[in-house]
Image (cartoon, grey):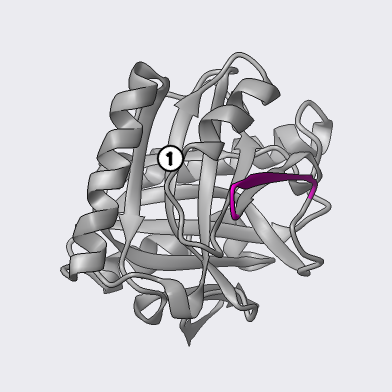
Amino acid sequence: MHYLATIVGSGQGAQPGSPEFAAGVAKYAAFQESAGAAIAGGAALFPSATAVNVRHSGDRMLVTDGPFTEQAEVVTGFYVFDAKDLDEAIQLARQVPAAARGAVEVRPMVMWSPHDVPAADWWVALLWEPQPDVIAPGTPEWDAMIVRHGEFAEKVGDAIRGGGALQPPATATTVRVRDEKLLLTDGPFTEGAEVVDGLYVFTAASPAEATEIAAQIPRGPQGRSEVRRIVDVGF
């Protein structure tokens, strides 16, 4: 079974290319070597200050630069784990370096399309929805949204390199490690009204093209797509 491990930390993370970032990459490389085939996907993201948020208001598309909110914790990257159950996914999440200073939200996925090793022209669109608007799998609303996502995928074609949908936020477990002690909290990491309920990994030649692609992703009336560039770390 696949689980999305959303890596959460300070919005003031190390800048890619800095010595601090390189040290962090080494820690994650060691984790990935240890986890091996249990890692079915993932990427590090450029700082949240570089984000672009896309939402629709009626017939208008609204594009906002930078973090959407002033949350103390923001998404800094993600993994997808291939684990037999939640307990195994949690044990993997506790080994993620960020768990010792931030948090890792673990949530089962409804579906996952794996991707290759990310390159410099890769982006991720995190799909956010207000918690009351999250559509449950197996409902007529879910089936209708799947059709819309299929139409989107057909339209943008080979630009899509991977993606997935999540089970409802009530299924999430937030993992933290403090003084080597495992701390688990039921529910998503954010205390805000919005939660991530899916993502796409795709290629684009520029921020403008990435924004254009993200603007076409089906969302609920109050949903948004957070566009972030993926860091090419070489593995």
Vertical order, 22 against 192 (above or below): above
Q: Kindly give the residue lying farthest to the front in the view shown.
A: 59
Drawn side of residue 61 relative to residue 223, left or right: right
Q: Position of residue 85 (x, y in %)?
A: 21, 68
Query: Circle 1 sits on which residue?
Result: 200
- Residue 42 horizontal side relative to residue 195, left or right: left
Camera sees residue 114:
no
Q: Is residue 128 visible?
A: yes
Residue at point 66% right, 18% down?
206
Quadrant hosting residue 24: top right
List x then y, in percent, for residue 220. 46, 61
Percent position (x, y) of residue 44? 59, 39
* Residue 156, above or below 39: above
Where is residue 23? Give x, y as percent.
72, 38
User: Badge 1: how crowded within 10 Å, few (<14), some, or many (20+)?
Assistant: many
Name the residue: 59% across, 47% down: 59
Horizontal side of 180 relative to 20 (left or right) equals left
Give the answer, above or below, for where 100 lies relative to 16: below
* Residue stretch rendered in magenta on the structure: 58-66
Q: Which quadrant: the N terminus? A: bottom left
Q: Nearer the viewer, residue 39 or 156?
A: 156
Q: Nearer the viewer, residue 165 or 60?
A: 60
The residue at the point 75 percent across, 43 percent down is 47
Task: Give 150 or 69, whichever is nearer the viewer.
Answer: 150
- Left or right for 55, reference 2: right
The answer to whether residue 161 is magenta is: no
Query: Is the magenta region chiefly helix, strand or loop?
Result: strand
Q: Secondary structure at mark 1?
A: strand
Q: Please report the residue visible at 44 percent of the width from the left and 47 percent of the height from the top.
A: 199
Residue type for callout 1: Tyr
Residue 183 versus residue 9: which sits nearer the camera?
Answer: 9
Total numbered labels: 1
